Amino acid sequence: MKRFVPQPGFAVSAHRLALDPNATAIARLYSHAGGARAAYNWAVAHVTAVWDQRRAEQSYGIPENELTPWRSWSLPALRKAFNEAKRTDPRFSGWWEENSKEAYNTGLANASAAFDNYAKSKKGKRKGAKVGLPRFKSKRKARLACRFTTGTIRIDADGRHVTLPRIGTVRLHEPRPDLRARINAGHMRILSATVRLDRGRWFVSFQVEQRDELVRVARPDAAVGIDLGIKSLAVLADSDGTVTEVPNPRHLDQAQKQLRRASRVVSRRQGPDRRARKPSRRWEKANRARNKVQYRVANLREDTLHKLTTRLIRTYGTLVVEDLNVAGMGRNRRLSRRVADAAFGEIRRQLTYKTRRHGTRLVVADRWFPSSKTCSRCGAVKAKLPLSVRVFECDACGLVLDRDANAGHNLLTLATRNTSTIRMTGTGVAGDLDPTPMVVGSKPRGADRKTRTTRPGHPAGKGRAGGTIPSPRAGTETGDRQQDTRTQLALW
């Protein structure tokens, strides 16, 4: 399938709007989402039934050329097979006409993508963790969603309602006349709409093709080094020499008392188990109350991060951040909850797409760049700097500075490096790339000196002195960068 390419001067983005549907619209939304789930389960059974049949025939010694033919899981093949079966299959024959064809197409498309991911993962053509065989979606656990790509999809003229195929007109929770004005001006075109039930509220997400509207930043020639942390959410080192600390609101920590109380109530109710026991009404009520607390925390965190990143993007022309190993940091059992609450990865994601939208520059420091251990005045690098040490003291020049402020200044220096050494793809990626060394004196662990040679006739093995110095990602470096194999795999 061809990938959609927006016209010049336009970009593809999304707008997520909350809905206030009435009883009729709610019933239709549930029906469409349930139809998508049923079509997905049908596609999984349709494809895997042949696999089981072939496996049984092979156990009986049937030759390969006489086995049951394979069934294709491509979307056109699944759609053709489903259209032939829906009129006679008792699971669909009584109600399939009530919903739009887009409901069933959503489930079939998701099943086709799931089988593609499984096949590519098994052949080693897909990055990331291994993907298992697609499984059936439970009615109790499945997330209800449906995607519309054809039919009447629009934001009404009043900006207060949206119209979707077979569902009709649905009221928005908040009016959006600005989106309607962009559409009328020809600056936006709706490509698709996805409705989803998220924590008890229905949302619609419009995928649109809209014109790029570059907004001039307040200080286009200024740069800022952003050091993310837990004690302070961010320490901003401005190019004018000032250092600003953004406090960490710690929304999850503040809600721990409510979460513990709500969790205790849930644990005392009769909930579901692996034997498919239905939960009690009181358990469902208590679980909704607990989810409401979590939902509020997520909304507060999202609001804080969007306000922070938007303020930075609208102020500075160049931003410098670190390429943090968030997955590895999350394995620290003492800090995992606070690392997840700070959402370093989300900050990086928002800065990436917002810099592209505003036409500014984002420089990402290399993961091994020693921003905290490097003196921002003379460039000397410490061999060790434990996390418990919050004040940086330089042994060479005597500089005494807050650890995070020192890291922010070091990140800021990357913005003034030679731009020819920075790989630009809408964002910059930099590390210790300057041809002129920034570090004064010896590097830690004697990295600037050759190791001793081995005796004649005794070739150096992997990791031995005299041999090739292993990469930090090889998992064999000693000292403060030594990490196990699982942590190294998480870096890729």
Image (spheres, helix red, strand yellow):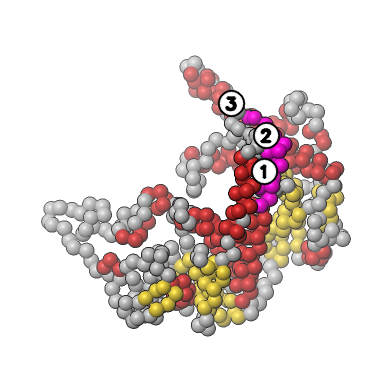
**Residue at image x 81%, y 52%?**
20
The magenta-colored residue range is 276-293
Q: Position of residue 161 (x, y in %)?
A: 84, 55
Q: Position of residue 255 (x, y in %)?
A: 62, 56
- Earlier residue among tags 1 and 3: 3
> Residues at badges 1 and 2 in contact (C-beta under 8 Å)?
yes
Instruction: Residue lying at the far left in this picture: please name it.
Output: 456
> Residues at badges 1 and 3 in contact (C-beta under 8 Å)?
no
Q: Secondary structure at mark 1?
A: helix
Q: Is residue 292 above or below residue 157?
A: above
> Marks 1/2: CA distance?
10 Å
User: Is 232 on the left or on the right of 152, as rendered?
Assistant: left
User: Is 433 on the left or on the right of 192, as rendered?
Assistant: left
**Within the magenta stretch, is there residue 280?**
yes
* Mark 2 neighbour density, 10 Å: few (under 14) some (14–19) many (20 or more): few
Q: Is residue 439 above or below residue 68?
A: below
Q: Which residue is mark 1?
A: 287
Q: Is residue 9 above or below residue 418?
A: above
